[in-house]
Amino acid sequence: MFVRCLTCFACGNSYPKDVLINLCECGKPLRVDYDLEQVGKALKRSGSASRGHDLWRYRELLPLPKGVEPDSLGEGGTPLLSADALAQRLGLPAGTLWVKDEALNPTGSFKARGMAVAVPMAKHLGAKKLAVPSAGNAGGAMSAYAARAGLEAHVFLPRDVPVANRIECEIFGARVTLVDGLINECARMVQERKEAEGWFDVSTLKEPFRVEGKKTMGYEIAEQLGWVLPDVILYPTGGGTGLIGMDKAFEEMEALEWIGPKRPRMVSVQAEGCAPIVRAFDQGLHEAPPIEHATTIAAGLRVPGAIGDFIMLDILRKTGGCAVAVPDRELIAAASEMGATTGVCASPEGGASLAALRRLVATGWVKPGERIVLFNTGSGTKSIEALAGAMA
Ligand SMILES: *Cc1c(COP(=O)(O)O)cnc(C)c1O
Ligand SMILES: [Zn+2]
């Protein structure tokens, strides 16, 4: 309701706020810019406290115009759980480690946050049919919100996607196409067919509003920690909407004077078999060339190339963060360790963030006493084959 315009993350070109649009002319993602002075008058830091727990408590910082009600499924408002038993196993003091449990979102992953904003915005701006390439959870979330909004959903998934991801899309009435290849191949099919079919493409960062939904994780962490951000955030990274969204949230909060200038060191966690961001970070590159023959059991991390690569790499560097790759056996073992010590139904991706933390504690990059947030980005029940294989 306080959106000023859309601005290109790369070239700075700006676009009007009320058009259905994918990328900038230059081919890079668009960012939603707000009139934060007006937001600051309408919403105080303490003001959201009296509202519901879903992400719409930050309504003034979301793009839906006044009077346009979202077709909500109760997304966001997930718990930030203390993890003292886990901290102790890592040699960290009590009261310094938390797990943000995104498994509790509708459709069992934080993809719900992005789609909860992107789908109603696409509908508001005139889209009737939506299409998305997905490594797993994005397809289910888009299908659910499209069903709720009464829009047609077309989902393109790798043929070997976890069964739960395919079935949920079908439950929500989406048309599912299984593709020989990974998410980049799925994306190519959407790209080729969307014009003829009249589909609006809601691929990661190819429309501006999924990031807006995901940024609410940043607002929630700040609010849940009494408006003092943690020292380190570990985030299992695929397309990077969460990393980019949280950074955007922190910038907005600073402009609103809800927080000071200090930022968490952001850590991008990937699987060894598919770690384009880690490789580019280590090589000092500003873009991440795609990985050939990418392979990992963590479906959400099976993203060989990301259009927001340059934004992520910039965030890691400017916050003094880093990027860590962990092997599949380690991330799967860490998922059960997280589950057994916290009660969170950890996904392989959530396990990856714990495995990365253990490595960073071992090298001294993370010091005892620093305040750390780990992300469990989805529910382990959606990756049942991967986890069952490891338990057998
Ligand atoms: C999509 C996904 C990720 C990666 O999220 P991005 O914001 O695209 O980087 C991590 N974990 C799970 C479970 C996912 O579904
Ligand atoms: Zn541009």
Image (cartoon, rainbow, N blue to C red):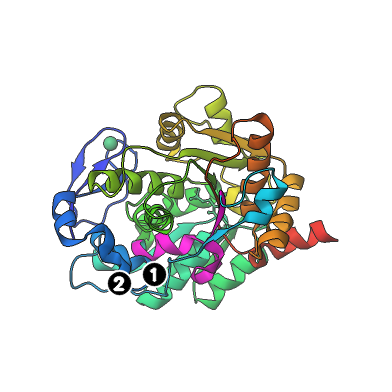
101 falls in the magenta region: yes
User: Eyeballing the image, is 274 above or below 114?
Assistant: above
Q: Quadrant of ligand 2?
A: top left
Q: Which mark identifies residue 50?
A: 2
Decide which of 170, 320 is in the foreground and name it.
320
Give the magenta range.
96-117
Q: Residue at x 42, y 40 (%)?
A: 308
Decide which of 87, 277 is in the foreground and name it.
87
| Rendering coords of residue 340 (x, y %) | 73, 61
Judge left or right: residue 371 versus residue 59: right
Can you tell which of label 2 and label 1 is closer to the viewer? 2
The part of the image, by quadrant, that contains residue 315 is top left
Tell me the element at label 2. helix
Between marks 2 and 1, how big is the CA–CA gap? 12 Å
Judge left or right: residue 213 versus residue 96: left
Residue 324 seen in the current view: yes
Q: Which residue is drawn at 48% across and 60% down?
A: 111
Outermost residue toward the top? 284
The part of the image, by quadrant, that contains residue 159 is bottom right
Q: Disc 1 residue type?
A: Asp
| Rendering coords of residue 299 (x, y %) | 63, 53
Q: Disc 2 residue type?
A: Ser
Judge left or right: residue 269 versus residue 388: left
Residue 298 seen in the current view: no
Quadrant position of the C terminus in the picture: bottom right
Q: Decide: few, some or many residues near mark 1? Use Cα within 10 Å; few <14, some 14-19, many ≥20.
A: some
Mark 1 = which residue? 54
Quadrant position of the N terminus in the picture: bottom left
Decide which of 158, 318 is in the foreground and name it.
318
283 falls in the magenta region: no
| Rendering coords of residue 284 (x, y %) | 50, 22
Total number of numbered discs in the rendering: 2
